[in-house]
Amino acid sequence: MFIVHIASEFAGVAKVGGLADVVQGLTRELSIRGNHVEVILPRYEQMRMDRVWGYTKSYADLWVPFHNFWVHCDVYFGFVDGVKTYFIESHFFKNFFNRSVIYGDRDDPERFAFFSKAAMEFLLKSGKHPDVIHVHDWQTAMVPLLLAETYKHFGMTHPRVCFTIHNVHHQGITGDHVLRQNHLNPSWYLGDDRLGDDQYPGAVNLMKGGVVYSNFVTTVSPTYMHEIRHSTLGHGLQNTLNRHWAKLGGVLNGVDYGVWNPEVDALIPHHFSPENLDAKYGNKKALRDRFWLADTYKPIIAVISRLDHQKGVGLMRHALFYALANNCQFVLLGTSPDPKVTEDFWNLKRHLNDNPDCHLELAFDEGVSHLIYAGADMILIPSAFEPCGLTQLIAMKYGTVPVARATGGLADTVFDANYAHVPYHDRNGYTFNDFDQAAVDSALQRAIGMWYHYPQYWRELMLNGMRKDYSWNHSAQHYLNIYEYIREK
Ligand code: ADP
């Protein structure tokens, strides 16, 4: 099958969050399975071009119609992690892609609407007719609209579109200029059943357009799809999603076991596996040495996270003191974009500086994260919402038991040791429902109690998590099934 991903991020060269990992992991797995896969990205200024192999200009002078003039672009080609990738460079005076950040400018909707248009223009002019075009989040959600209303009339009748929502919190709500710039009449497309935002009259909602015009819409976990359809987590998109219920689905993200595997991980001092579990404790010792923690008989509870409301930053702070009061050690690796939160955590760090059972590492450090996954006993994930979540999946592979709020992808992957409706051999952690301190306390209390009093059961929980396969293998097959399904429609 010929599959083209049009995306604003791709791990390795341009990453802001999980979207980048999905595009990389999925495209690589789809290629390995023999599909013809290509990725189209903007050519940002700050890309990691050292990770692109065989970078060459592949299409010179792509003129993209925009507003009432033509924008001059060039298209480059190279391999990223073995995947064929095209980079669209725009020579527009507004400098759409050469910014210091990937997202965060006021004209983001205009920038990414233009990118969507340029990607379609490239497919048309280069004579590519993919079976499936896969787009991601609001940034490229205009692609299915452009295909249906413009490019279909130029002969692109073949491709079907799959649209993945990674985070419904950001929907690309903007003015109608993005329609006019792309030669779409606002009075027609602003309708309630098209791109008109349900909450702000007169505003264009790009994500809504993606839902309406795609052949299939996925979220990155089944429970997250349910939540955004039936609760305020949908941020106003509920009606649209429910109207299009027949083409919705949830596919869990995978983990790249080439990077996250305790049997071969070069960033941890002691390799281990389900057959050789005791070697994990060499990493626990190394973690304690690294963070000057006391070497005593206590479990280590870890947090590895962005420090923001979504991730339950207040509950992490609460859990720290609960852990210290209940004979545990606590390790946190995290950063926050909010200076106030950063300052709070620095104050906390200074306050706890001499405590031999606690360490806060306020940095983004992938190497340290590997050591924590390998050395900790539990990982706490008290998210307010979680489209999929990677930390619980990685932690389980390293025999670190998740204690997580049962929301989104966490609810689909963490099964409570005591209460889950799954067989014992699938139970792998502790969950709680309410987003409050009492709920965290009760889950931690059960987990700590099990660790101290029933080590043999604890070991089973660890092994259940380690043996489960959360690689891209399964997720890619789900997506292939979806692609096949929409091709036949
Ligand atoms: P999100 O993408 O919403 O931040 P995920 O759970 O999907 O959350 O992915 C988080 C990823 O970022 C994980 O791989 C985690 O290990 C990593 N991570 C988060 N914070 C840090 C940090 N401070 N240092 C290193 N890695 C981090």
Image: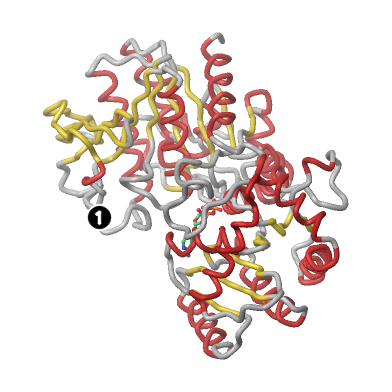
Between 398 and 332, the residue placed more toward the observer is 398
Whole-percent x, y for residue 51 in the image: 26, 43
Name the residue carrying label 1.
99
Between 273 and 408, the residue placed more toward the observer is 273
Asked whether, in this view, residue 76 is left or right of residue 419, the answer is left
Asked whether, in this view, residue 113 is left or right of residue 43, the answer is right
Specify whether tag 1 is near ligand 1 (CB below 8 Å): no
Report the label total.
1
Whole-percent x, y for residue 77 in the image: 21, 31
Which residue sits at x=53%, y=50%?
A: 262
- Is residue 263 shown above or below 318? above
Q: Is residue 108 visible?
A: yes
- Is residue 400 shown above or below 79? below
Question: Could you say which quadrant of the image residue 154 lies in?
Answer: top left
Label 1: element kind: loop
Which residue sits at x=51%, y=75%?
A: 289
Between 49 and 62, the residue placed more toward the observer is 49
Q: Is residue 235 visible?
A: no
Instruction: Give the quarter of the figure containing the C terminus.
Output: top right
Which residue sits at x=55%, y=32%?
A: 211
Between 317 and 96, the residue placed more toward the observer is 317
Asked whether, in this view, residue 348 is left or right of residue 416, the answer is left
Whole-percent x, y for residue 197 in the image: 55, 43
> What amino acid is found at the position of numbered circle 1 in the picture?
Arg
Whole-percent x, y for residue 165 in the image: 54, 39
Which residue sits at x=21%, y=46%?
A: 50
Instruction: Give the quarter of the figure containing the N terminus.
Output: top left
Few, some or many residues within 10 Å of mark 1 (<14, 14–19, 20+)? few
Question: Could you say which quadrant of the image residue 302 lies in?
Answer: bottom right
- Is residue 92 shown above or below 481? below
The scheme the figure's colours follow is secondary structure
